[in-house]
Every structure is written in structure tokens, then in C-alpha cells.
Amino acid sequence: MASPLLTDKQLAKEYGIRPSGQPLDCPSELGYICPKGHGGDCLHWSEFKEHIWCLKCKMDYLYADCMLKRMCWMSDKQWEDFLSDLDEKPQIIEGIQHFPDCKIPHQERRR
């Protein structure tokens, strides 16, 4: 199954295929979590635009169906800029998601 509602063919027609190239950040580095709660190495950019692929669910999810948590390396301004650039807004989870190799300044830990 390609997505909860659409087949691969329908996804390609409605959203289009993502252009080739290497993205700078993987979905988990931007704070994405699939609707079932999977994150980390389970998430990849889908071949379809505006979608994320979850290896555990074996499903493409629209960004707006996913959840987001601010990554520890993002400043408040970067987070706001990132959210404002999204076409559709996913559910925002309060708090900070810590990435394994992220160095967190002392003052940031107290939030």
C-alpha cells in the first residue's frame, strides 16, 4: 500500500515524482515522526512530492499527516522559518526532540 488513501499511481498523478538529487537533511533530522510514532532511521523522503516514507509502516505519508517536534539544533527563528515554508502544516508536538549527535547548550536544556 502506497499511502493510507492513494495508490502509487494516484500519488504520482496528484503530487508528482520528487526530482532526483540528494537532500541535505533526512526527515528525522527535521523533527518528523510518522502518524504511528516511528522516527529516526525508519523515515525517508518518499519518491512522491510532499510525502515521507516509513519503513516500518511500509507507507507514504503526506507531510500534513505526520507530526513534527523542534529539533535540538534549530533555533526558535529557524523553527518558525521552517514551519512557514511548509505548504500544509503537520501536527506540532511540544518540546524539543534531541538528535543523537546534537550538542545542546546549557541554557537550551532548561526549556
Image (cartoon, rainbow, N blue to C red):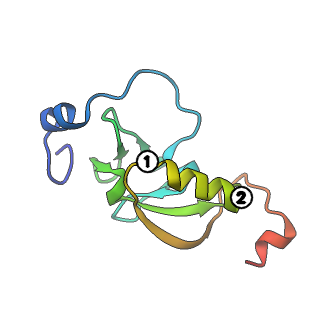
Percent from the top left, x then y, of residue 81? 59, 52
Give the residue pinned by disc 2.
Answer: 75
Neighbor class of circle 1 (other Cα within 10 Å; few <14, some 14-19, many 20+) is: many
Query: Which of 43/80 is in front?
Result: 80
Mark number, residue 76: none
Q: Nearer the viewer, mark 1 or mark 2?
A: 2
Label 1 and label 2: CA atoms lie apart by 23 Å
Percent from the top left, x then y, of residue 19? 39, 23
Q: Is residue 5 left or right of residue 23?
A: left
Residue extending furthest bottom? 110
Element type at mark 1: strand
Q: Is residue 5 left or right of residue 46?
A: left
Neighbor class of circle 2 (other Cα within 10 Å; few <14, some 14-19, many 20+) is: few
Amino acid type, residue under disc 1 in the picture: Leu
Residue at left offset 79%, top offset 62% = 104
Percent from the top left, x then y, of residue 18? 36, 29
Using the rendered view, name the quadrant where residue 45 is placed: top left
Element type at mark 2: loop
User: Up-down: is 80 above or below 91?
Assistant: above
Q: How many marks?
A: 2
Give the residue pinned by disc 1.
Answer: 43
Q: Quadrant of the N terminus?
A: top left
Query: Which of 15/48 is in front?
Result: 15
